[in-house]
Image: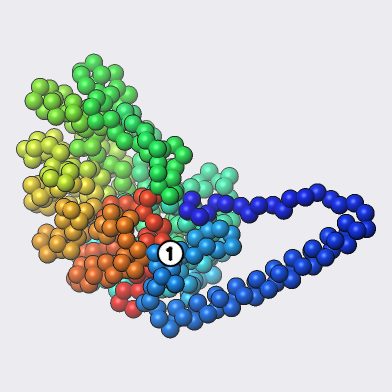
Amino acid sequence: MAGGGRREKAESGGKRSGAGGKIAGRKRTAAKAKTKAKTKAQAKVKVKAGTMAMAKRPGAATKKAGGAAARKTPAGSRSAGAGGTVLKTPTAESAAGVPVATAVRTAPAPKGPFVVDVKPDWEAFIANIRRQGTPKRVHFIELFLDVEVQDAICERYGVDAGLDRNDPFFNLRRKVAIQRFLGYDYIRICPAGMDMPTKVCVAPDTAELSRASGRKFMEEHKGPITCWAEFHAYPWPDPAKADMSELEWCEKNLPDDMCVIVSGVAHYAEYLSWLMGYETLCYALTDQRDLVRAIADRLTEIYRVLIPRMLQFKRVKALWGSDDMGYRGGTLMHPKDMREFVLPGHRMAGRMAHEAGMPYLLHSCGNLKAIMEDLIEDVGIDAKHSFEDTIESVIEAKGTYGRRISLLGGIDVDFMCRSDAQAVRERVRKTLDACMPGGGYCLGSGNSVANYIPLDNYLAMLDEGRRFGR
């Protein structure tokens, strides 16, 4: 973790014998106590001064206040950077602002890097996605935060302090605490027990918040299914046996002001390329279209059973399909092939969501201009997620199809990696000025909060969103 996770060295040296050793030890102890008291007093003065300065200039984000250069705290962890001085904290009525009436039990609300407090409001969040007018405040959304980012936030701000790690639902309680702390109105739940083995390549992770196991990339040449024998031998999961325990827990324990977004489904284009290998898929579209058809049909049958099982829970308020369909220049397959093998599955998912009275959101990377009309008019998506500046910025999209569907995220990931916190804040304000009027926009990254995005830049994005319109 960036600047965190380090423990101060324990003082070395064993016991001293004799009166001289005891006297010397007392002198050293007294000197240390005096120095510690002096350091603590100086720290209080600095914090008070910094708080007053931030209160006078709430929009300031200079290098001295944080900006690109994060300060180091005595514990070795990085400070919150720009906007990191706390003027207000979540109410102490419960942990991380969780209403007392719920069954979620956490530690006292942690102090955070945000100047403006927000509380979850899932109804306003969904109304915004439905484009029912300009919302009263900015709502946030992310496909996910890398686990290293979640760990760094918990370590820096003590978000999961007091949670029982032996609780079988510790991870869910932690997820709720993190989402509330950051200002989200929902938690995202994916189906459990639906693993589909693929072939991956592993490379060292060079991110500052790196993972020891490395970064995994899909094998693009040959996947586990390249012929009919492998198709029949593949361990297809049974959607009737998918584990719904997390959704059952949410029914009883999720705070009333939050909702569930069901995700991790409708991976049609992705699984076609992952299961066959992208290179093999490209050949198969000419040589083995019947095998491509069989894989697409099997995926459809799995989701035909799985999605209704997940949508039956009352706390679920949106379905989020996730399916990377393109690259920078266009779709991964010819648009005609997309319409034959991929879009029918999304049409089914969208219909199921709409019949359940909820919106269908779509995450897809890549240039989808060739099929965007299909997605809006035929599939019936209610919102589009994932934007990349080199393809189309979210501000550009707002002026075209953004008048017909909602837009989610859009603060370009590469920009967030290369910029400082002040530049991120300026980008956020510009984006909100363009996208907030009329509703139908949620603030977030252009893709997801990867562990190579500077943590302070991510927090600056959220903080600036909280300040908008205040």
Neighbourhood count class around disc 1 (C-alpha, 10 Å): few under 14, some 14–19, many 20 upward: some
Does dot 1 land on a helix, a strand or a loop? loop
Q: Is residue 469 above or below residue 367?
A: below
Q: Name the residue tied to disc 1.
A: 69
Residue at image x 31%, y 36%? 217
Residue at image x 39%, y 73%? 62
**Residue 193 placement, left or right of 17:** left
Q: How many circles with numbers are drawn on the protein?
A: 1
Amino acid type, label 1: Ala
**Percent from the top left, x then y, of residue 248?**
42, 46
Q: Please tell me in which quadrant of the rendered image residue 21 appears.
A: bottom right
Choose between 126 and 134: the one closer to the eye. 134
**Percent from the top left, x then y, of residue 72?**
52, 62
Residue at image x 84%, y 63%? 26
**Residue 438 placement, left or right of 147:** left
**Percent from the top left, x then y, of residue 245?**
43, 42
